[in-house]
Amino acid sequence: MKKSLIIVLISLISTAVFAQMCDLYFPLVESNGVQFQSFDRRDRLQGTQDLMVKEVINHADRIEAVINTKYYDNRENFQHESDFTVICKGNEIILDIQSVIDQSMLQGFQDMEVEMSGIDIVFPDNPSVGQELEDASMTISVSSGGMKLTEMTFTIRDRKIEGMETITTPAGTFEAFKITSEMHTESRTMGISHRITMTSIDYWAEGVGTVRSESYNSRGRLESYTLLSKIY
């Protein structure tokens, strides 16, 4: 009886610790959600994303949460939806790299064979200014009838916490970590390669997650940005 009680208590304590750590990235409570709005460099609305915690699964050594994302165009017409996973394990918060990939580009491959593999995005549970973060990558291979049609590789590298800034969005004002990184995209189709390099600046607030994200081209010009617009 005592042994069973001890096991239950350990399980409850572990779950509480993991839940607290997860909340540093995003409050992982079922039905909680946030909304993001994306704009071009001329401040024109390009689209909206609604993220909602669909399911939270408690394991002995980790917490997994499934996040549902719904995409809308600039006229608020529904486009499509997808799910990604957040895992809290040890002293790390692991974000499915699929969450940063534009899912609309996969819509044209619905009737084809699509294979995805990669290294997910990792956030420390105790971030600090000056800290360098691990790289992340993803490869998407598209085939039809056993023939490879195209392969795309996304690599996020040189991730670093540069400092703290006060960021104001429609959802409020936040003290946020400024995280810089480079996104390298390479596509190969019929032996022809195409490469794009973008610089990203993400502002990440504890207990909320990303509150602002900016993308710059290889010449350093702002191309687009995304703002946290609502917290549900």
Image (tube, rainbow, N blue to C red):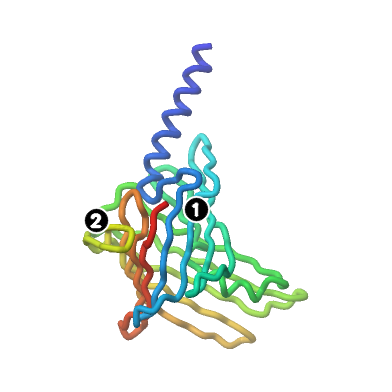
Foreground residue, 224 or 14?
224
Q: Amino acid at mark 1?
A: Met
Q: Which residue is mark 1?
A: 52
Q: Is residue 110 above or below residue 191?
A: above
Residue at 46 percent of width and 70 percent of height: 155
Q: Amino acid at mark 2?
A: Glu
Residue at 22 percent of width and 59 percent of height: 164
Residue at 41 percent of width and 75 percent of height: 45
Q: Position of residue 114 (x, y in %)?
A: 66, 69
Indicate left or right for 123 with 130 as reference: right
Q: Is residue 218 above or below residue 170?
A: below
Indicate left or right for 192 with 228 as reference: right
- Name the residue at the top extreme: 1
Q: Position of residue 180 (x, y in %)?
A: 31, 67
Residue at 45 percent of width and 52 percent of height: 33
Total number of numbered discs in the rendering: 2
Label 1 or label 2, whichever comes before in sequence order = 1
SS class, disc 1: strand
**Crowding at label 1, few (<14), some or many (≥20) Cα neighbours within 10 Å?**
many
**Crowding at label 2, few (<14), some or many (≥20) Cα neighbours within 10 Å?**
some
Q: Which residue is mark 2?
A: 175
SS class, disc 2: strand
Foreground residue, 107 or 42?
42
Q: Position of residue 61 (x, y in %)?
A: 49, 37
Foreground residue, 115 or 24?
24
C-alpha distance separating marks 1 and 2: 23 Å
Indicate left or right for 224 with 111 as reference: left
Q: Position of residue 151 (x, y in %)?
A: 60, 76
Q: Are marks 1 and 2 in contact (CB under 8 Å)?
A: no
